[in-house]
Every structure is written in C-alpha cells, then in structure tokens.
Image (spheres, rainbow, N blue to C red):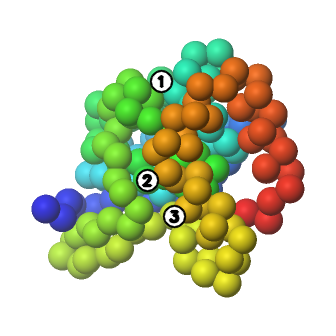
Amino acid sequence: MIPQYASALFISDLHLTPSMPLTAQRFFDFCEKDAPKVEAVFILGDLFEYWVGDDAAQHSPFQQEVKHALATLSTKVKTYYLHGNRDFLVGKHFLSKTGMTFMPDPSKINIAGSEYVLCHGDSLCTADIGYQVFRGWVRKAWIQKLFLKLPLKWRRSIANHLRNNSGM
C-alpha cells in the first residue's frame, strides 16, 4: 500500500555531526517548529555524516540528542527513514527507539493526490561503476553483519577512511 498524505516535508543529506553545530541546530529547530505542521516527514538518507551501527549511538551524546529529537517528532507526525550512502547501517534498534518507519529505496508515496518515487539518489549515479560495485557489496546483509561485529573503534576508522577518500 502506498502511503498517502495531504502534506509532507522532506530532508536529505544533512550529514549531521557535532562539528557542524549550526546545521544541527537548524535540524533541531526543524523537528520542533516546522515538521509538526505537516502529516509526514520523509528523511531521505544521510541524516548523519556516517553511521557505523546502532550501538555506536549510545556512546555519542550528539547522536543521543538527535535520537531524542526524532523520537519527540515521531510522536507528533509520521516519520519515515530511507537509507543514504553514508547511513545505510541505521538499523531496527535505532528506528524503534525513534519511532520512525523504514522505507526501502526506492519507495512510492502519494502527497495531495500526486504520486512520487522517493530515493536517496546514489543508486542513480550509474556512470560511477566503482561506486555501484561498492554499494552492491556493502548493502549485502552478510557483509553488514561482519562489519558490525568489528570493534567500534575499527568501524569508525574504516568509515572515516572511506569518507575521506570518496567523492560521495
């Protein structure tokens, strides 16, 4: 069934990090002031600069603050989350703690009688064959399970290396 709403807001690619406090504050203001005015909010990936597993959030006061803002927002408006290229490891635990509903990439929705297809957009970069191969591998469940078994310090180091050497 295609979700149908009269009004919605969309956000994507905020790349939230404690090192960008103005962006973070604007996100918190959005959650508190703007988002509750519509029926649904769609987060279309890369909310965080990177996400190395739901367990990492418990060690980050900043991610806890974002989690609290999302949980509060989800009590006021239906909130959806679609993975991006830097936060595809956002999992069931984080989603349940925030009250958000997961949406696969791509997904169809209906807003005010018009149908739309939502996606993060990285799957559309078809000319970047190297990235598409990488994307195919890291989206495999068994690869993600192996990665999530690594120590948190290693996962952060790998994520930083990939982020610093990526055009995405």
Circle 2 sits in a helix, a strand or a loop, which is it?
strand
Q: Is residue 68 left or right of residue 166?
A: left
Q: Mark 3 or mark 2: which comes first in sequence?
A: 2
Q: Is residue 119 above or below residue 26?
A: below
Judge by depth and name the residue closer to the eye, 97 or 41.
97
Say few, some or many: other residues with alpha carbon within 10 Å of mark 1 (under 14 / 14 to 19 / 20 or more). some
Q: Secondary structure at mark 3?
A: loop
Which residue is more in the foreground, 150 or 108? 150
* Residue positioned 68% across, 77% down in the render: 129
Which amino acid, by three-letter code, is at mark 3?
A: His
SS assignment at label 1:
helix
Residue position for label 2:
82
In the displayed structure, 40 sits above or below 168; it is above
List x then y, in percent, for residue 109. Answer: 26, 67
**Amino acid type of the residue tagged 2 in the rendering:** Leu
Q: Read off the residue under disc 3.
A: 120
Q: Is residue 127 visible?
A: yes
Q: Which residue is mark 1?
A: 68
Q: Quadrant of residue 56?
A: top right
**Residue at the (35%, 74%) spot, across then down:** 117
Q: Residue at x 69, y 21 (%)?
A: 151
Residue 71: x and y in percent read 39, 28
